[in-house]
Image (spheres, rainbow, N blue to C red):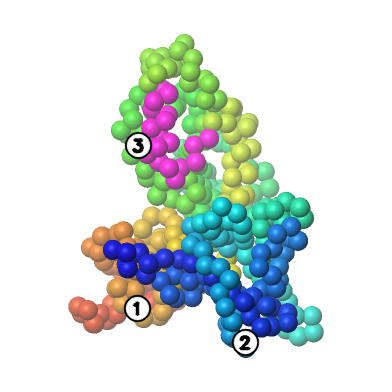
Amino acid sequence: MGSKSQEQETLWVLEKVDHPRFPYRLTITRGGEVVLALRTQDRWPGSQGNIFCLPEEGREFPPPTGVLERVPVVSLRRYGKRLSVVLDRPTHRRCDFLFLKKPYKNRPGEYEQVFWQTQQGLRERRPRVRFTVRPPRHMHIVIDTRERYPWRFTGCRVERQRLPVGDYALLVRGEIRAVIERKTFANLVRDLSDLRVLHQRLGELSAYPAPALAVEAHYADFLRSDRVKPLNVRYCVQALAELVVLHPGLAIQFLGNRKLANAWALSYFSAAAGYAQDDSPLRVREALARYGAREAPIGPLLLQVRRVIEEELPPEFAFHQLQAWFPGVDKERLRYTLRKLQARGEIRCQGRGRAARWVKLSQEGSGGRR
């Protein structure tokens, strides 16, 4: 048991190097495999703000001369163009690596810059850009046709359609990337009277990316016995707590009134659109894949599988390659999803049994729907 845990252990390793500009080698390893390797100018950024780093891949550097520190990694996650690391030690625990692409001044193409930053350095330096994702200039918002008096989204492309779930949805490149279920105070009080049905509806909502429940009321309104009749306050408090616990991926917001809820929804969609359009750098995606913390595909399973096939798998792939992206999904459910995509003309199967290979088909050649 101990050897198995050691094989999967993720370590932060800092080594000394005999080099005038980059005297340190920083690697993050998992089970002996290198997740990220950088040559750095110092041991830790501290209050100086940034440390410029060079990716080791594709460059010649002298080998390390000794290990300075070896620390377990608690977390490795992406936030926009940043790779955020949390270490298992009392000090110097949290840091970010910012990956940027810059155009060459005198020739076409781009080059990569990597900056190592800490919380202390970011506070003291106070960078000009404070948002993790950049809000987009234009958004495409769909309002469900059953909404009688919908919110307004000034400056956005708005259309009315029958949504599969929720009342408002953000579309990015034709796909739902955020969805909001709107509830007035009276709506939610009525729905709380039958929690089983409400859980089913919120469970379906949570299957989509960036789901939210926007309540046009204050939480304190549910503590007034004269307003929640025929329910009682104790029941409402427990029911609302149950919604939060059983749907942890759902953003439940008590927004006071219609006007504030509308304003919040616009900001929420703006953040979701910025994140959806802000593709993570290739080196960050590779590091997360090696770490075993691939960015989870989003949306219902068919959309998840389609996105993995289009963006992550080779033109011909085996079933086990797809299954590696969905370790918690039943095999038969995955196979059923592949058959649905095959029926749509998006992929086809060659061979049988373990030798079978799935082949991607172009949209033009297949006549499939997207």
Q: Kindly identify which residue carries mark 1.
A: 317
User: Seen in the image, is 210 located left or right of residue 116?
Assistant: left
Q: Kindly identify which residue carries mark 2.
A: 62
The kind of secondary structure element at disc 3 is helix
Q: Is residue 120 visible?
A: yes
Residue 139 image point, x, y percent? 62, 53
* Residue type, label 2: Pro
Label 1 packing within 10 angstroms: few (<14), some (14-19), many (20+): some
Whole-angstrom CA distance, mark 3 to mark 2, is 59 Å
| Residue appearing at x 52%, y 25% in the figure | 219
Whole-angstrom CA distance, mark 2 to mark 1, is 39 Å
Q: Is residue 155 positioned above or below 215 on the image? A: below
Residue 122 image point, x, y percent? 71, 55
Kindly report the secondary structure that dominates the magenta region of the rendered protein: helix
The kind of secondary structure element at disc 1 is strand
Mark closer to the chain start, 3 or 2: 2
| Residue appearing at x 45%, y 12% in the figure | 225
Q: Kindly identify which residue carries mark 3.
A: 199
* Residue type, label 1: Phe
The residue at the far right in this view is: 106
Tell me whether the residue at label 2 lies in contact with that at label 1, contact meaning CB atoms closer than 8 angstroms. no
The span picked out in magenta is 236-253
Whole-angstrom CA distance, mark 3 to mark 1, is 37 Å
